[in-house]
Amino acid sequence: MARSKSHKRAQRRAAGKHGYTEVPLPSGRFLDALTSGGGRATEVERSGKYNRLLNAADRLREAGTPQKVLVVPHNDIDLAVEAMREVGITGTVKNITGSKKKRVRW
């Protein structure tokens, strides 16, 4: 399925000037964005569906980077925090514009 314009924009913003988008993971899945130094992995999930948030959090866990960021629409921040806790990872949940964020400690 094709990515929406806002999804691609969020990916590029998260990757930074010299970062990477659509990074392959060992399992064959793809990570949305990775910074150039490999220190921050970012997943963008706009659907608001809990099982898709769990999958995004699982991809972040597989990335194995020190910083993990899950970007979701503002209304889904609390649901994304629950998904990250269920998967068992520590990281940050931000809204798409970046104006709000919550730290998740497992």
Image (spheres, rainbow, N blue to C red):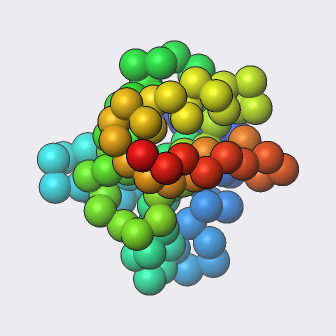
* Residue 97 visible in the shown view: no
* Residue 81 visible in the shown view: yes
**Residue that lies at the very extreme toward the front in this rendered image:** 106
Query: How far across and down, in percent of the image, does residue 48 sit?
Result: 59, 20
Query: How far across and down, in percent of the image, does residue 75 sit?
Result: 74, 24
Is 27 on the left or on the right of 105, as rendered?
A: left
**Residue that lies at the very extreme toward the right in this rendered image:** 99
Q: Choose between 62 and 15: the one closer to the eye.
A: 62
Q: Choose between 42 and 83: the one closer to the eye.
A: 83
Query: How far across and down, in percent of the image, does residue 2 sit?
Result: 50, 32
Tell me what residue is drawn at x 76 percent, y 32 percent. Answer: 74
Q: How many marks?
A: 0
Tell me what residue is drawn at x 55 percent, y 31 percent. Answer: 80
Tell me what residue is drawn at x 40 percent, y 69 percent. Answer: 66
Image position of 99 with respect to 54: above or below = below
Q: Choose between 34 and 81: the one closer to the eye.
A: 81
Tell me what residue is drawn at x 44 percent, y 75 percent. Answer: 39
Image position of 29 with respect to 1: above or below = below
Image position of 66 with respect to 74: above or below = below
Query: How far across and down, in percent of the image, does residue 67 sit?
Result: 47, 65
**Residue that lies at the very extreme toward the left in this rendered image:** 27
Quadrant where the N terminus sits is top left
